Amino acid sequence: GENVEQHPSTLSVQEGDSAVIKCTYSDSASNYFPWYKQELGKGPQLIIDIRSNVGEKKDQRIAVTLNKTAKHFSLHITETQPEDSAVYFCAASWGLSFGAGTTVTVRA
Amino acid sequence: EAGVTQSPTHLIKTRGQQATLRCSPISGHTSVYWYQQALGLGLQFLLWYDEGEERNRGNFPPRFSGRQFPNYSSELNVNALELEDSALYLCASSLGRLSGNTIYFGEGSWLTVV
């Protein structure tokens, strides 16, 4: 089955700085890579996704890049704000395999 | 449009008892997924149902079971509860079992086993 590794497990950034989270996957057949944000006490919310025929996708302050050759993809958050503080999960193969999560803390 | 809804929000059970959690998917979605999230841990895949059939199962013992009804709603049953079953149980739904269909999560059901 698919194995997804996510790094780092925790990330602390100063407000206004950028945050980058990286994931690697094992199954070269995977073709869909969503990212979810989970706030305390809530269910995960989809924030952005990318498919294998695209190398990069942006949505305002959030971007995702995909390198199929190296089998890794990354989430980039620019101009971080306190409300970006949450746990972020990556997934491969439409979500049966999730990364372990990254706790992002934005310091004011 | 209503999202994925789960009930109950919180449930407290005694070790050895059975727990039943319920999920209603987004209208039009035929696939339902169940995940377990222990406190501070990641999302562990439990079960996937589509069109009433179990399509995939995670690495959990048989006392974790479920079903999907004709209206695509689903329930998760956990028998012979153990203390380590205490967790947030998340249900999610998607349009179907084609790879690449986005999964949408509910807010979860907190199960506490005492």
Image (cartoon, coloured by chain):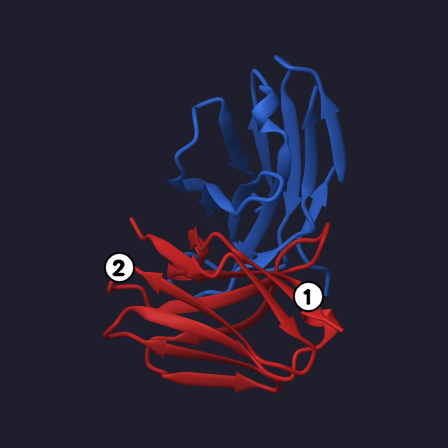
Chain colours: A red, B blue
- Vertical placement of residue B86 versus A31, above or below: above
A38 sits left or right of B32 in the view: right
Q: Position of residue A106 (x, y in %)?
A: 68, 70
- Give the number of marks: 2
Mark 2 residue crowding within 10 angstroms, few (<14) / some (14–19) / many (20+): some
Quadrant in the picture for the C terminus of chain B: top right
- Vertical placement of residue B96 versus A51, above or below: above
Q: Position of residue B67 (x, y in %)?
A: 52, 34
Q: Residue at x 71, y 77 (%)?
A: A81
Asked whether residue B73 appears in the rendered view, the answer is no
A77 sits left or right of A22 in the view: right
Kind of residue at disc 2: Asp
Element carrying mark 1: loop
Mark 1 residue crowding within 10 angstroms, few (<14) / some (14–19) / many (20+): many
B89 and B21: which is toward the camera: B89
The answer to which of marks 1 and 2 sits earlier in the sequence is 2
Kind of residue at disc 1: Ser
| 1 or 2: mark nearer the eye | 1
Q: CA distance from mark 1 to mark 2?
A: 30 Å
Quarter of the view holding residue A12: bottom right
Residue at label 1?
Answer: A85
Residue at label 2?
Answer: A27
Q: Residue at x 66, y 38 (%)?
A: B22
Q: Position of residue A86 (x, y in %)?
A: 66, 62
Chain assignment, label 1 = A
Q: Residue at x 37, y 56 (%)?
A: A4
